[in-house]
Image (spheres, helix red, strand yellow):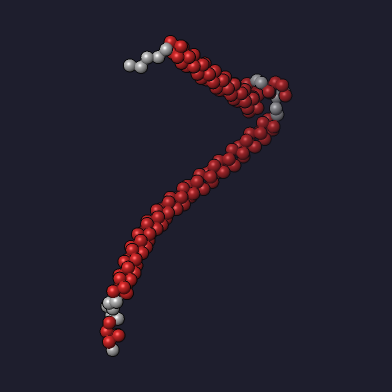
Amino acid sequence: IVQTSPGLLGLHNIELRRLLEEEQAAYKRKLQAYQEGQQRQAQLVQKLQAKVDPSRGGTGIIWGPPSSEESSNELENALIRLEEEQQRSSSLVQVNSMLREQLEQANVANAALSEDIRKLTADWARARDELEQREAEWRREEEVGTPRAGQGSSREQ
């Protein structure tokens, strides 16, 4: 059983309260920012609705009722922008799909190359070990003076 002094518990309690207050203040700031963002968004929606339908009030009263030609032009421009954005979005979806396919192909190729590197490294290590064994064998034969296989018959001739 660990015993702690009352002073240490008090300090720990104070620290925990401070952390709680900081977290609460951060939460309140986030909530405030979220609420302000919602208010701005609601105001923007109201302004846009007033531009599209002046009978809803708002900016239509301040600027006067827009002519049907102005409303028609604004709606037409908005539709054109919407169509352009939809085409761009569709194009980006296609590009994204193509890039995903290329990434998948690159990952497959990368895996194959990694496997090739692994095999080549293993082959190289085996060849190096074999060469070292042959060199050691050759040195032993040189030290002993025994001819290697195939060389003895050529010396006798």
Q: Tell me if 88 is positioned left or right of 8 in this view.
A: right
Residue 88 location, x and y as percent?
Answer: 57, 43
Q: Observer-nearest residue: 62 or 130? A: 130
Query: Where does the N terminus fall, quadrant-wise?
Result: top left
The outermost residue toward the bottom is 157
Relative to residue 25, is residue 145 drawn left or right? Answer: left
> Can you give x and y, in whole percent of width and height, for residue 17 in the image?
49, 14
Most extreme residue toward the top is 6
Give the percent coordinates (x, y) of residue 139.
33, 71
Can residue 42 be seen?
no
- Front one among 118 and 45: 118
**Residue 47 visible at all:** yes
Is 147 rendered above or below residue 38?
A: below
Q: Is residue 117 above or below residue 26?
A: below
Residue nearer the viewer, 59 or 125:
125
Res 157 → quadrant? bottom left
Q: Is 21 placed above or below 127 here?
A: above
